[in-house]
Amino acid sequence: MRRNDFLAEHFQLTRRYFLKAGIAASALGTVRADDKPTAPPAAQAPDTKQEPKPGKRAKPEKAGARGEPYFTPTEDFRDVSRGKPVPHSLPEEKRREVGLTRDTWRLEVLSDPDNRAKLGEELTKADGTALDFAALLKLGEKHAVRFAKVMTCLNVGCPLGMGLWEGVPLREVVWLTKPRENLRRVFYYGYHNDDPKQMFRSSLPIGRVLEDPFDLPPVILCYKLNGQWLDPERGGPVRIVVPEAYGFKSIKWLTHVVLTNLAHANDTYAEQNNDVDSPLKTFAAALAPPDNVQAGKPIAVSGYAQVGISGLTKVEVSIEPADKPRPEGDPYFLTAPWVVAELLPAPTNWSALPDGKLPPHTHGFNVAGRPKSWPMRLTNAHWAAVLPGLPAGKYVFRCRSIDAQGRAQPMPRPFRKSGHATIESVTFTVS
Ligand SMILES: Nc1nc2c(c(=O)[nH]1)N[C@H]1C(S)=C(S)[C@@H](COP(=O)(O)O)O[C@H]1N2
Ligand SMILES: [Mo]
């Protein structure tokens, strides 16, 4: 599966829509190329200083084109991992030595010495009770779950990749310690080159681990992505995946789970002014904004939306003249001439998965491998629209999402350090 498959899939979906709308394929705008994203407006530029030195494929630009199919092939995920060196770059021999291969992995599950949780037992390397990969898979025989989730960095506009994540609910491992009292939160971290300064830690309330609110999948110890063993770059052999959270909650190269009576979050990510309790937001982004538009000709546009915790009912698009000043006191473009775009149906072939099929018993999908509802929370959806022709001139195109409560982007949480939700604006010329 190559990058262009995502766009191929996107345009397969949009083609039917555009043909129905009477738009010839030749009239459609050009695709915004993955390596040529439109320059982000200053207010929308990701705060790259907040992210660690990006890995080789990291492209921390704003929301924009991703050259991938619906599920992102593992090798096409973007990487923003920290570490000197990043753990997945260690030679195999070193990874074996530090427990970063399936046959050497050991997970310690401990009570926090500073804020004791009362446990029946701890799982430690010292007394040989640490959990190994075989024991994790054994738990998986009974408890394994899989779900679709888009991995998005709170500080990068554009998702890093869409995955089908598989693993064992973290609560199954918590129960192995026979907890009794004084257990309020869980924190966890991964291999960090044995350097305390490099530790990347995240945390959750115990309630979220033990129970799944509404229709959310559980927090898991993940060992498979898109039907294959989780590879070193994605955090293998085992990482945490928190379905509704931004990427920093999903700790890679997991080595330690600590049960604690601490009453508050102690995430490493909090150190950089990030809102560490912010669930994934809903937003719309353009893949094919207006481009090469001829005067009087209909304007075809399309893109995707990240469906966050607040759901998605609509994507809307608008075009305004670029040189006309906008009304004062309307920072969220509420007065723009919004029109509803079409939300496109779910793909029928899930390329990047073995045989293009959803495996049975995937959270949110029925026995036939079709989504139970669409658009689906915590994943991407596609949209398209055809707008009436315009006289020659300079214009601004915008797109926004409307969530399940009817709130327009960037609401309900417009703050940048809670995750990207800025309304995308693209200037274009009609000639
Ligand atoms: N151990 C560890 N886990 C980590 C990180 C890290 O630097 N070290 N980065 C986090 C951040 S900030 C993000 S956005 C996600 C990215 O996940 P991905 O690399 O699989 O796309 O991993 C998270 N897990
Ligand atoms: Mo991140």
Image (spheres, helix red, strand yellow):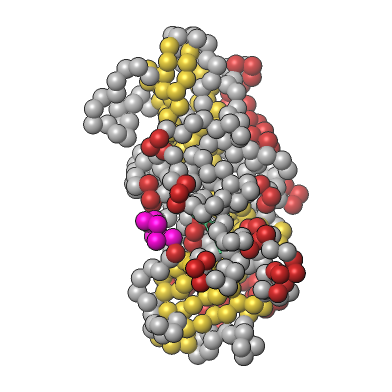
Residue 210 makes an appearance in the image = yes
What number of labels is visible? 0
Looking at the rendering, the stretch of residues picked out in magenta corresponds to 269-277
Image-based side of 189 in relation to 400, left or right: right
Image coords of residue 314 (percent x, y): 44, 37
Please tell me which residue lies in front, 115 or 372.
115
Q: Does the magenta stretch include residue 273?
A: yes
Classify residue 36 by image quadrant.
top right
Classify residue 134 by image quadrant.
bottom right
In which quadrant is the N terminus drawn? Answer: top right
Please tell me which residue lies in front, 181 or 106.
106
Q: Is residue 347 above or below residue 308?
A: above
Q: Is residue 96 above or below residue 64?
A: below
Q: Is residue 44 above or below residue 138?
A: above
Classify residue 67 by image quadrant.
top right
Image coords of residue 48 (percent x, y): 47, 46
Q: Residue at x 49, y 52 (%)?
A: 51
Q: Which residue is drawn at 38% across and 68% down?
A: 265
Q: Does the magenta stretch include residue 90?
A: no
